[in-house]
Amino acid sequence: MSTIVETKDGVMTIRFDRQEKKNAMTAAMYAAAADAVDRAADDETVRALLFLGREDFSAGNDIADFLAAGAMQAAIEDLPVVRFLRRLVACEKPVIAGVNGVAVGIGTTLLLHCDGVVAGASARFALPFVPLGLVPEAGSSMLLPLTIGRNRASWLLLSGERFGADEARAMGLLSEIVPDGELEERARAMAAQLAALPPNAMRTTKRLIRSVDAAALAAAMEAEFAAFGEAMRSEEARTAFMRFLSKR
């Protein structure tokens, strides 16, 4: 499954644990993560969620798994990644992410739904949707311009160009940067800090922060899902996928 879920002291840790593939996400990993967020929503003992990887956070979708699972023919609503994203957006409990190594595609876009993100100094980010014949997901076509500005967001989403932790912090994607070896300790401390605070006030404050853009975000995500489904079934995407796999 390659997604490890543990709960301790009020913090549910969802760890992507497929380091041999740089934590490239499979359908099973998305399903396990979605199930975990679901359980956290109904468990009063869970006060905060924490996403972690290993040496890498996530290299994005595993293209080979994507093809093997028939994702290019499946209805978009049936994809585990869609269920995971819906659960993450709906989560009323605070979400922290600790990012080491590469954070590609959804490894970057899921950070837009977190309430605190700390990265190791050598972390590297990229949004290579267009180079793969795809389109942005996770509401990033709306949230990224709001977070970092339209011009810079357009360039990163269109080009797929990589950028480092310092630039991500300067753009507002990260709360802070720490030495690589201190990443997990700091991420756990941030999650524990929020988990110790009054839960009702936490939930209400998070809802208020996000309520301004909630309807627009829902509309943006629906438009992205529809466009993503069309892009997946295109010859353009298939060609890009085959080219990507041939380079591995």
Image (spheres, rainbow, N blue to C red):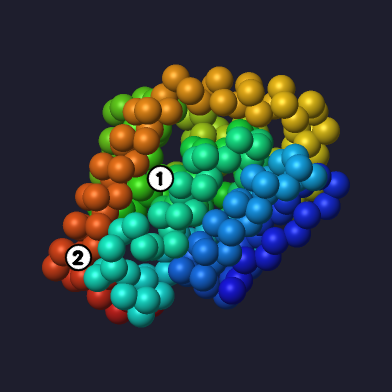
Where residue 138 sits, quadrant-wise, is: top left
Question: Hey, what amino acid is under mark 1?
Answer: Ala
For mark 1, give the secondary structure: loop
Residue identifier under label 1: 138
Q: Amino acid at mark 2?
A: Arg
Name the residue rendered at 63%, 56% in the picture. 36
206 displayed left or right of 74: right
Q: Which mark is residue 171?
A: none
Q: Residue at x 47, y 69 (%)?
A: 26
- Work out whether mark 2 precedes mark 1 in sequence or the reverse, and give the earlier one: 1
Does the rendering let one see residue 196?
yes
Q: Residue at x 75, y 59 (%)?
A: 6
Residue 172 percent coordinates (x, y): 51, 29
Q: Which residue is mark 2?
A: 233
Residue extending furthest toward the left: 235
Quadrant in the picture for the N terminus = bottom right
Query: Whole-Å distance between the Cαs marked 2 and 1?
Result: 19 Å
Q: Quadrant of residue 91?
A: top right
Q: Position of residue 173 (x, y in %)?
A: 51, 34
| Secondary structure beneath label 2 | loop
Question: Pointer 2: residues within 10 angstroms few (<14), some, or many (20+)?
Answer: some
State the image coordinates of residue 180 (x, y, percent, origin top left): 69, 50
As rendered, which of 36 and 103 lies closer to the eye? Answer: 36
Instruction: State which quarter of the image contains the C terminus.
Output: bottom left
* Residue 75 drawn at (x, y percent): 28, 63
